[in-house]
Image (cartoon, rainbow, N blue to C red):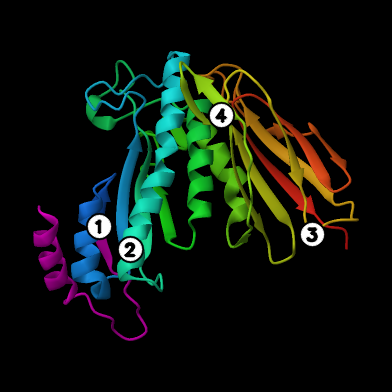
Amino acid sequence: MRPEYYADLYRRYQTYVRNYGDNKIHRIACGANADDYNWTEVLMREATRFMDSITLHYYTLPTGEWNNKGAATGFETKEWFSTLEKALHMDELVTRHSVIMDKYDPEKRVGLIVDEWGTWYDVEPGTNPGFLYQQNSIRDALVAGLTLNIFHKHSDRVRMANIAQTINVLQAVILTEGEKMILTPTYHVFNMYKVHQDAELLDLALESGTYSFEGREIPEVSASASVTAEGVIHVSLCNLNHAAAAKLPLELRGLAGQAPEVTGTTLAGTAVDAHNTFSEPEAVAPQPFTAFQLEGGVLNLELPPMSVTVLEIKPKA
């Protein structure tokens, strides 16, 4: 459909979706696929007052080609880098769609819902192509971590975000085989990041080094931070570099003169396609993170290569 035609249909049919009693309907308009900014422009222009949210879809394909997406395992460093590079594109997409939304909704009443995101690879050999079954590696964990960091950054507009599937399909958090079940690296990232739920976003100024490959560069580290109602700070950090640890200082402003209690959890891989199998379900699993030193209000960190780390910082009472 053209966006003009869809906007007319949306306006017609939303009329019949009404609130009854104490029930409160949240009306969601079908939004853009990736960088179709004209779609967002037209929908916001024609139907803002009739919607509560608008959606956005974007999948991360290593090759960028739908007919040859790339393999979930057994890939080269080139595909590792390109996958993370394309996952980082989510920041530009959310930023540019949000700018258009701000034009028609400066009060930010309408939410942006990224209701389809995640990695999409060629299906596993020997499986039904229609079932979209793919393995899940530490690369997917990095995609999950940096994407969630992006959503946190834009939480004034992004009200909901849904990884495309959860079990046995695309970037799943659980894989099953008969009665067997394994947790994927993506599952562990979601479990580690749940500390941000219902917390308040903290401003974070990140000066990251660069991660280079064959003349292309991306930031080496992605990060986000939040504080709970009890004052506990959580910082999530992704080291995208597949070969080198990332050393960086974390300045704890506002905690000067204190000696907070710091603990951490990290998820890392021994290879770019490290993954869990039904014979080795714990090959990629969270471990305690201890590679830090607190000196005068600065937390000096050394993040392992290709890792997702979450720190918990409890101020002294």
**Quadrant location, the C terminus:** bottom right
Seen in the image, is 109 located left or right of residue 238? left
Mark 4 nearby-residue class (10 Å; few <14, some 14–19, many ≥20) = many
267 or 133: nearer the viewer: 267
Residue at image point 80% right, 42% down: 299
Residue picked out by circle 3: 254
Label 1 and label 2: CA atoms lie apart by 8 Å
Q: CA distance from mark 4 to mark 3?
A: 29 Å
Tell me the number on the disc at residue 101. 2
Could you tell me if the residues under marks 3 and 1 are in contact, i.e. CB atoms within 8 Å? no
Give the side of residue 171 with respect to residue 303, left or right.
Answer: left
Where disc 4 sits, the SS reads loop
For the residues bearing labels 1 and 2, Cβ distance under 8 angstroms = yes
**First in residue order: circle 4 vs circle 3:** 4
Query: In the image, residue 238 lies at what x, y percent?
Result: 60, 36
Q: Which is nearer the N-term, disc 3 or disc 1?
A: 1
Task: In the rendered view, tell whether residue 105 sits above or below residue 183.
Answer: below
What residue is at 54 percent from the left and 46 percent from the top?
149
Residue type at tag 4: Leu
Whether residue 230 is situated above or below residue 193 in the rendered picture? below
How many angstroms separate mark 3 from mark 1 (CA)? 40 Å
Q: Which residue is mark 1?
A: 40
Residue kind at label 1, given as amino acid type: Thr
Q: Amino acid at mark 2?
A: Met
Q: Which residues are magenta?
A: 1-29
Query: Between disc 3 and disc 2, whose residue precedes?
Result: 2
Label disc, if present, on residue 150 of the rendered structure: none
From the viewer's perspective, tell me whether residue 243 is left or right of residue 16: right
Residue at position x 33%, y 20% in the image:
70
Element assignment for label 2: helix
24, 34: nearer the viewer: 34
